Amino acid sequence: MKRVLTWLTILLVAGLIAYYYLGTKKMLEIKFDLGKNIVETAKGSGIPEFSVDNVNGSIFYEKNQIPDDIPARYIRPGYEITASPLFAFTLYADEKKNNNLAVSNVTLQFKSHLKTHEAGQAFVEKLIAQFQKGKWQRKIDETCPAVTGRSTFLDEAGNLNPERGCALDPNYKLTRDEWLQMFLTTQYYEWSGEGVLAELSVRYNSDSSGITYTIFLEFKDEITQEKLYAKKLADDVAAGKISVAEIVSDKVERKINNDLLEANAIKRGDTVIPR
């Protein structure tokens, strides 16, 4: 009888181990896209359980501490992007919009696993290469000059300007010195594809504890972003923070400045991209 109980105990323990092991192995990858209901997107993602928050109608589905061998994959045909290792994966929808709780933002936060600048630059360049292979098109904000190469981060005098705030040219490979100067401040790469804006943000911090890279990859619905920007501008006008005349003046000044930056880019051998 004792022998039977012993074998039953062994089988039970083995079964529990197998169940736990197989259960954790079910999540082979995280799949996602934008524009569909957040509940259905979460169910189809491959993540067995999310933490869910509703903050005044802003709904967040989040998963943290993702195993290093579980990549996230943007599955839209022709625009596929695969990324890892992730610290956090977040889906966002707004219940105040009459859009069936469609996912309008997906954010991938990478783990702080890069301990050298060589590793940091190589990691970022591999992500960029995926965007360059697909149907994605480089996105240039209307407030920025439509230039290529080094001209994306040089000022009017031709000096390196980490504070400029315009997305870098993904086709340009920064030198190590340029990399070290630029990425002490958050820098961006942006692409557009089928109404989705993909934004890769990168910066590093260096102190006595070593080098730490902070990297996010966010996919955003472009129409939603444009509406949010327009609403903020309208709210600022209504609140008296800025006037319509100031908005028009600022737009004119930006146009003059961008024309100068684009002319300088041509002089140094870079090009201007038709908008």
Image: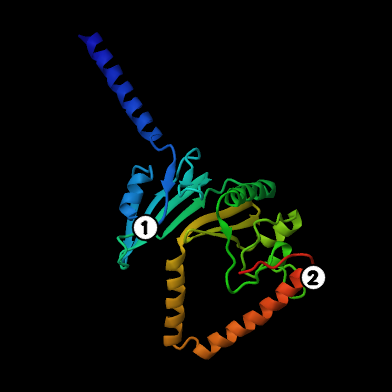
Instruction: From the image, tell me which residue sits under label 1.
Output: 60
Picture coordinates of residue 90, whole percent (x, y): 42, 54
Instruction: From the image, tell me which residue sits under label 2.
Output: 267
Picture coordinates of residue 15, whole percent (x, y): 30, 23
Please tell me whether residue 193 is drawn above or below residue 234 in the rendered image.
above
Name the residue at 74% across, 74% down: 263
Quadrant where the C terminus sits is bottom right
Task: State the count of labels.
Answer: 2
Q: Which residue type does callout 1 highlight?
A: Phe
The residue nearer to you, when weighing 174 against 114, is 174
Picture coordinates of residue 166, whole percent (x, y): 62, 68
Name the residue at 61% across, 84% down: 252
The residue nearer to you, when weighing 202 against 126, is 126
Q: CA distance from mark 2 to mark 1?
A: 47 Å
Residue that sits furthest to the right in the current view:
268
Q: Which numbered disc, 2 or 1, marks the residue that appears first in the sequence? A: 1
Q: Is residue 123 visible?
A: yes
Answer yes or no: do the residues labelled 2 and 1 have beta carbons within 8 Å?
no
Residue 103, by quadrant, is bottom left
Q: Is residue 239 visible?
A: no
Name the residue at 59% across, 57% down: 202
Please tell me whether residue 13 is drawn above or below residue 41 in the rendered image.
above
Residue 151, by quadrant, is bottom right
Question: Relative to 117, is 26 on the left or the right?
Answer: left
Residue that sits furthest to the left in the current view:
1
Badge 2 crowding class, 10 Å Cα cut-off, few under 14, some 14 to 19, many 20 or more, is: few
Q: Which residue type does callout 2 highlight?
A: Lys
Name the residue at 44% across, 40% down: 29
Picture coordinates of residue 143, whole percent (x, y): 59, 74
Badge 1 crowding class, 10 Å Cα cut-off, few under 14, some 14 to 19, many 20 or more, is: many
Question: Relative to 123, is 29 on the left or the right?
Answer: left
From the image, state whether disc 2 or disc 1 is nearer to you: 2
